[in-house]
Image: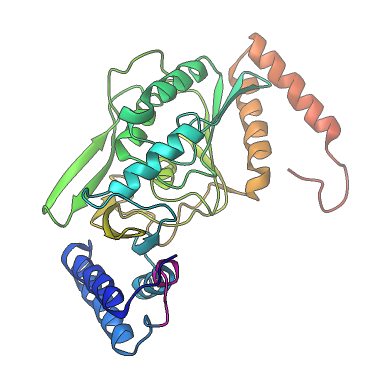
Amino acid sequence: MTRLQPAEITGIVAEARRLTTGLYVFPETGERIARVLDEALSQGRYERAGDAETLARLVTEDLQSVNGDGHLRLKFHPDPVPAAKEDGALLAELARGADLSLGGVPRIERLAGGVALLKLAPILFPLDMTGESLNAALALVARAEALILDLRECVGGDPYTSAHVCGHLFDEPTHLHTLYDRQDDSERQFWSPAPLPGPRFGGTKPVYVLISAATFSGGEELAYTLQQRGRAVVIGEVSGGGANPRRGFTLHPHLEATIPVARSVNPVSGGNWEGTGVVPDTGTDPARAHEVAHRAALAEVARLGGDTASAEEARRALGGLARDRPTAGPDARL
């Protein structure tokens, strides 16, 4: 990779500074971060970077040193990124990710007891990119008696896509969250939409959401919204803690500055998950979250289903789990 010249390094850092002070969602914090960059530049911290990947790491460390905002960074891209368009690097990355993940729906499965498992990863792609795949998946799980929504590897996404998913899980239009934008000094409310194409899972059947420390940004927003509205039980470990939506700016063929420009406010909590992550209702090792959620779902289907075929299947599955469960020792629990 071509080495960066000192003048290039100074120009890249200066532009990252300008964007941070001008656009960062919290102006006073942006000024503090800018002073960190100024000091590092004056002390020659970035001169030894040499290449774009190392510079990205060093500048990102300094950008995040004040308040730990995981969305604020100088991001390295191994492949050249578009220069002329805002968020061009993101759009190119999204197109590749959508192709590799079956439109962001890498797994859909019927489990015992009429429970459906729907995995959304690596992000919640824009609807104009993968809406057909998402709608097909949501239509399939609509018939299930309970739903496990796996967001353990969901690291971001479009808020309109998150709202679209929520539209299948609520019976009435529901206020999900509000984005406050610094640059426009404006706010946008996000509601679950109605009507929607195809059948809905609806607002009464049990929903369980799986999260992990890797769950971030748009994945967290979906989990947090469903949790705060009392629509889902969240299972796993505390998520990554990134709630401030970002915009991307190409500063070099391999470098993109990502600047959080807005903040999300939940109408129930009055806050969000920035820095704290989404705290699960049931904490467990993410590797076991699927098992824990399935057991809880089976119990609910058995309790609510009466003498239906799914309820009978759920009872049999629960009986099998009970027989397989150890009766002694430190692991004799789920």
Quadrant of the drawing holding the N terminus = bottom left
Residue 93's place in the image compared with 99, above or below, is below
As drawn, the residue found furthest toward the top would be 308
Residue 70 falls in image quadrant = bottom left
Residue at 26 percent of width and 82 percent of height: 38
Q: In the shown orientation, is residue 285 left or right of residue 51?
A: right
Q: Residue furthest bottom?
A: 43
Q: Is residue 230 visible?
A: no
Q: Residue furthest right?
A: 328
Give the x, y percent position of residue 127: 33, 29
Say if residue 286 shows up in the picture.
yes
Does 215 sit left or right of 285 as displayed?
Answer: left
Pick the front one: 188 or 22: 22
Q: What residue sits 37% from the left and 53% below the top?
A: 80
Q: Residue furthest left?
A: 185
State the residue in front, 6 or 281.
Answer: 6
Judge from the rendering whether residue 142 lies leftward or rightward of residue 114; answer left or right: left
**Is residue 161 one of those drawn in magenta?**
no
**Which image quarter is the C terminus in?**
top right
Res. 91 image quadrant: top left
The quarter of the displayed image where residue 133 is located: top left
Please give the range of residues in magenta: 48-55
Vertical side of 65 occupied by 181: above or below: above
Q: Nearer the viewer, residue 182 or 267?
A: 182
- Residue 226 location in percent, x, y? 41, 38
Instruction: From the viewer's perspective, tell me whether residue 125 is left or right of residue 251.
Output: right
Indicate the position of residue 196 as horizontal and vertical percent values.
31, 18
Q: Is residue 50 within the magenta segment?
A: yes
